[in-house]
Image (spheres, rainbow, N blue to C red):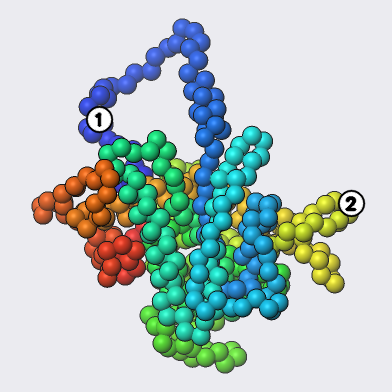
């Protein structure tokens, strides 16, 4: 269990008494009304959720976002219709306010067109990691002011959905290298995009297939030769399953096992981890199937229903991001990822720009050991690179 997620000990609280005895109530007090108060206040303020989608062009990222929130968040474009391929990675964000049953959600979606589309994709992840850390920096700058806003705008990325091409064989070296860096900075949920191009058997084989041999660099690309493989790429008979391979590369996707707080969390999250990466299909058009109006993709063989578990695992992704783990994604972002960034930056506060309400925070005393993680290998830059090369960091 991460120390940031643990409850404070008794010795750390001066006001706590050494013994807490149960008290028999003589009548109704109304303590349960606190839940109603919290609900009313939360509905007045609304909620914020920031999601990033990463993947090469043509994998249906925009359509998937529209399907998730049943709104026209992004205008989908068909590949090959005269839309020029971006020469460099360009991040685009759009914000909408969605209201359902009186609950308002301020949703910000960040797309990454151009990722992985170039011939030379060396360090193509730098703009994405830089953007994520830039949002942490904006939040930190507001947080350290003497006169702070009552509600600090939260633009931090709470979840990154990573779209894996449906090759049916393995992940690319680019995917492995990027995921290794990304999982240390933000919650990552990988999905197999356009899963309707694979059969059910191919999906399961892809999910459990070894994706990249341990110890293989980007320069040594294996060659597939039927039943055997040379170099780094190996088939399912050559190595362990995909989950073990992710652990070998130090890739901790969400939900991280070390953050399961109780037995109920462990049971629920274990079922989710068994199905990751989800095989999903996106569609923002409705069709009539057996008298029902469903979201789906129409082909000459029939209609692929995106909310039908027999067709794809989109319902699992939707439930994870919205119905069961939305608040947990925000909590881990604030208590773990942002906290790591905050510790690193405040310990180097002498480089912070002096602005209105500047607070000069002294460096940590030399006698205080530096926390493991971001301070062990701060990286080449002051902001945006502290978590890139820390290969020994644990969840």
Whichever of callouts 1 and 2 sits on the residue coming sooner in the sequence is 1
What residue is shown at x 40% (from left), y 68% (from top)? 181
* Quadrant of image for the C terminus: bottom left
Q: Residue furthest top?
A: 26
Residue on which the image places disc 1: 13
Where 47 falls versus 290 (above or below)?
above
Image point (27%, 49%), residue name: 355
Decide if residue 377 is on the left or right side of residue 158.
Answer: left
Q: Position of residue 336 (x, y in %)?
A: 37, 51
Q: List x then y, in percent, for residue 373.
A: 28, 60
* Residue 126 in the image, given as x and y percentages of width and height: 40, 71
Q: Which residue is mark 2?
A: 291
1 shown above or below 65: above
Q: Considering depth in this image, is 132 or 233 the residue closer to the camera?
A: 132
Quadrant of the rendered image containing residue 347: bottom left
Taking the image as drawn, is residue 267 in sight? no
Please tell me which residue lies in front, 261 or 125: 125
Question: Does the rendering let one see residue 100?
Answer: yes
Nearest the eye: 384 or 30: 384
């Amino acid at each position: 269990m991460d120390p940031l997620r643990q409850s404070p000990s008794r010795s750390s609280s001066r006001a706590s008494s050494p013994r807490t005895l149960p008290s028999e109530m003589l009548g109704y007090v109304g303590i349960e009304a606190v839940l109603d108060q919290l609900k009313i206040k939360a509905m007045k303020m609304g909620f914020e959720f920031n999601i990033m989608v990463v993947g090469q062009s043509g994998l249906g990222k925009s359509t998937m976002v529209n399907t998730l929130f049943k709104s026209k968040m992004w205008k989908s474009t068909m590949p090959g219709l005269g839309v020029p391929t971006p020469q460099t990675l360009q991040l685009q964000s759009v914000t909408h306010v969605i209201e359902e049953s009186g609950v308002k959600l301020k949703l910000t979606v960040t797309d990454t067109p151009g990722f992985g589309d170039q011939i030379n994709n060396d360090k193509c992840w730098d703009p994405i990691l830089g953007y994520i850390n830039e949002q942490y920096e904006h939040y930190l700058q507001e947080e350290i002011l003497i006169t702070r806003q009552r509600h600090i705008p939260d633009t931090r990325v709470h979840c990154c959905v990573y779209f894996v091409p449906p090759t049916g064989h393995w992940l690319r070296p680019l995917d492995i290298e990027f995921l290794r860096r990304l999982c240390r900075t933000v919650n990552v949920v990988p999905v197999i995009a356009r899963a309707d191009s694979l059969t059910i058997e191919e999906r399961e084989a892809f999910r459990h297939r070894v994706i990249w041999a341990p110890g293989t660099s980007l320069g040594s690309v294996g060659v597939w030769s039927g039943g055997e493989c040379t170099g780094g790429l190996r088939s399912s008979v050559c190595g362990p399953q995909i989950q073990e391979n992710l652990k070998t590369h130090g890739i901790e996707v969400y939900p991280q096992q070390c953050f399961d707080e109780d037995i109920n969390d462990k049971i629920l999250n274990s079922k989710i981890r068994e199905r990751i990466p989800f095989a999903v299909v996106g569609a923002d058009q409705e069709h009539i199937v057996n008298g029902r109006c469903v979201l789906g993709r129409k082909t000459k063989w029939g209609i692929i229903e995106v909310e039908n578990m027999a067709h794809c695992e989109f319902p699992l992704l939707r439930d994870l991001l919205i119905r069961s783990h939305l608040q947990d994604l925000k909590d881990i972002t604030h208590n773990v990822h942002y906290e790591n960034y905050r510790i690193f930056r405040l310990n180097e506060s002498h480089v912070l720009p002096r602005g209105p309400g500047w607070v000069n925070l002294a460096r940590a005393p030399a006698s205080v050991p530096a926390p493991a993680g971001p301070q062990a290998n701060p990286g080449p830059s002051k902001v945006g690179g502290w978590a890139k090369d820390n290969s020994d960091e644990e969840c």
